[in-house]
Every structure is written in structure tokens, then in C-alpha cells.
Amino acid sequence: TRGMSNDTSTIERLEVTKSHKTLGVRLEPLGIFNDEFEFLLKKSKAFATRLQASSLGSYDSLTFYRTSFLPGVGYSFPVVPLSFNASKQLQIPITSVLLNKISFNRNFPRAATYGPLCYGGLAIPSIYVEQGIAKIGLIMRHMCSESELGKLLTIALRASQLEAGVSWDILENTEPIP
């Protein structure tokens, strides 16, 4: 029923392997995000096609990448775990087109493409790095706001610190213990 009315509605039962779009993200109870990855890949290719067909110059192409592509594809980054290879697959279609648009060979080395300007790179944001930033941002927002999720994250972090059994903060030093 809904609210005060006596109208009934049927809740459809889904298999645990079937994803469901919820708040813009395709979630699956098993924690496998294949449907979301396929959706993001299709979206990435569509953005690449739009950019390639446009008459945008170098500056405007970079602006398109930062203001349209990254927010459009990166909406689900805080909650969807993408592997390095999956991120790379999402990045490939748009990067080749973007490099052409800014007058670089589409086979320009990716280390230089995503590298910082101070080391001779182009400083084009990498999807894999942007995903990590989004996840850290989500954790920090919740922990600083002391929301219920923030409290749970703090408890989990403290428990992990105890389990690690080391004196330094586990988020400060991420080198493997010998």
C-alpha cells in the first residue's frame, strides 16, 4: 500500500544476478557491476562520437572532456568499483579522439597524456584516478559530516587499524609490510 490509501502494488522479485537501476546506478546484489560497466562504455563511446563529429577547437575539446565527459561518465564512480583495465577500456574511445582534437597523435604515450604538466605531461585527468578521488571524497564527506554511514566508516577504519597491528596510520603508509 502507499501512504493512507488502500491501493496495493506488486513488488517484482529480481534474481541476485540481475541489476536494477537505482539513483542512476545499475546495482546488483552480488556486487558485480557488469551492466553498469556496459552502460558506461556505451556512454563513453557516445561522448567520443559526439566530440569527433564536433567542430570544437583544442581548448573547447578539453573543456568538453572536463565539464561533460567526466561528470557524465563519473556519476557512479563513488559507488562502482572499476578495475584498472575496466577504467582503461572506458578511457580508450574518448582519449584517442581528444588527442586528435588537441593536435596530438592518437597514439601519443598515455603516461605523458595523463602525466602532470610539470613533468611534460598533458594533465588530462585519468578515469582511474578520478574514480579514486571520487571514492575518497565520498568517504571524507560522510566521516566529516558524522552521518550514520560516516560513523560506520569510522568504526570500520578503526577496526582495520587495530587488525593491521601497526603503529602508523594505515591510510598514511600504503606500502606493503615486508
Image (cartoon, grey):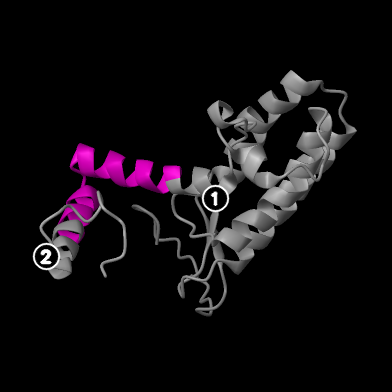
Q: Nearer the viewer, residue 63 or 152?
A: 63
In-image side of 23 versus 137 (left or right): right
Q: Which residue is mark 2?
A: 162
Mark 1 or mark 2: name the one nearer the start of the chain. Answer: 1
Is-magenta flag for residue 138?
yes
Residue at the spot of label 1: 128
Disc tally is 2
Query: Residue 12, can we see it?
Result: yes
Asked whether residue 40 appears in the rendered view, the answer is no
Asked if residue 56 is positioned above or below residue 46 in the image, the reply reads above
Q: CA distance from mark 1 to mark 2?
A: 29 Å
Q: Position of residue 33 (x, y in %)?
A: 55, 66
Q: Nearer the viewer, residue 142 or 1?
A: 142
> Mark 2 belongs to which amino acid?
Leu
Q: Is residue 2 left or right of residue 10?
A: left
Residue under the image location 25 percent in, 49 percent down:
172
Seen at 74% across and 21% down, the residue is 60
Image location of residue 160, percent across then percent down: 19, 64
- Please report the bounds of the magenta region as a residue range: 133-156
Q: Residue 62 or 17: which is nearer the viewer? A: 62
Q: Is residue 50 above or below residue 54?
A: below
Q: Secondary structure at mark 2?
A: helix
